Image: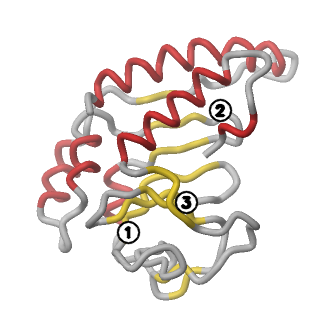
Amino acid sequence: MDYLRWRDDMRQAIDGYLPRIQAVFARFRQLEPDTVTDEGDPAALRKAEEADPPLPRSLLELYASIREASFEHLCNAYFIHSLAWILDSLHRSDIPAWAPEATDERLAVFASDGGGRLFAVGYTSGTVFRLPVGAVANQVYAGSIDSIGPGEIAKDLADFLDRLLRLARAFSDEDYDERLVL
């Protein structure tokens, strides 16, 4: 996947929906724009190359092109966390590395939404899983208070990013379909 093109396409999509959102909230305050950063984080990339276990290659490729992304005004909000955040969270007991209800493989959480759901990529398959709000104990996701339950939502990181881009483009329309959310 061409992550630089995705970054530029997301910026165009933001330019499409943000004026509509700004018009709604203009009487309250000026909104900070949603962003996709330009540069990667060379120090975090070097550290990621030495991570044990090694992070999925797709994440390293993404973070060579961006540092992080914030879509605070897109639907319920979406955030692609920085590589430094991912590396810091790899051994935190409150960040899931395992979700037995969804998959047997190790996961790397890389994104979240404004409702507390986490998005994680499988180390082996590259599949992206959604983990609704739920308990985490010793890095194991232990359930959900969300009726949709945890599960696969994209075949890989490229598919996830493409779905996010389609959502952002559709959100520009006044009559966007809410069923597009991730």
Residue drawn at (19%, 58%) of the image: 48
Q: Element under label 3?
A: strand
Kind of residue at disc 1: Leu
The x and y percentages for residue 45 are 18, 49
Label 1 sits on residue: 107
Label drawn at residue 130 = 3
Q: Position of residue 102 (x, y in %)?
A: 51, 73
Q: Nearer the viewer, residue 128 or 97?
A: 128
Which residue type does callout 2 highlight? Answer: Leu
Mark 1 near mark 2, Cβ–Cβ under 8 Å? no
| Secondary structure type for disc 1 | strand
Residue drawn at x 38%, y 48% is: 82
Using the numbered discs, state the Cα–Cα distance from disc 1 to disc 2 in whole angstroms.
25 Å
Cα distance, mark 3 to mark 1? Answer: 11 Å
The reply, left or right, for residue 114 in relation to residue 140 is right
User: Residue 74 has which mark?
Assistant: 2
Say few, some or many: other residues with alpha carbon within 10 Å of mark 2 (under 14 / 14 to 19 / 20 or more).
Answer: many
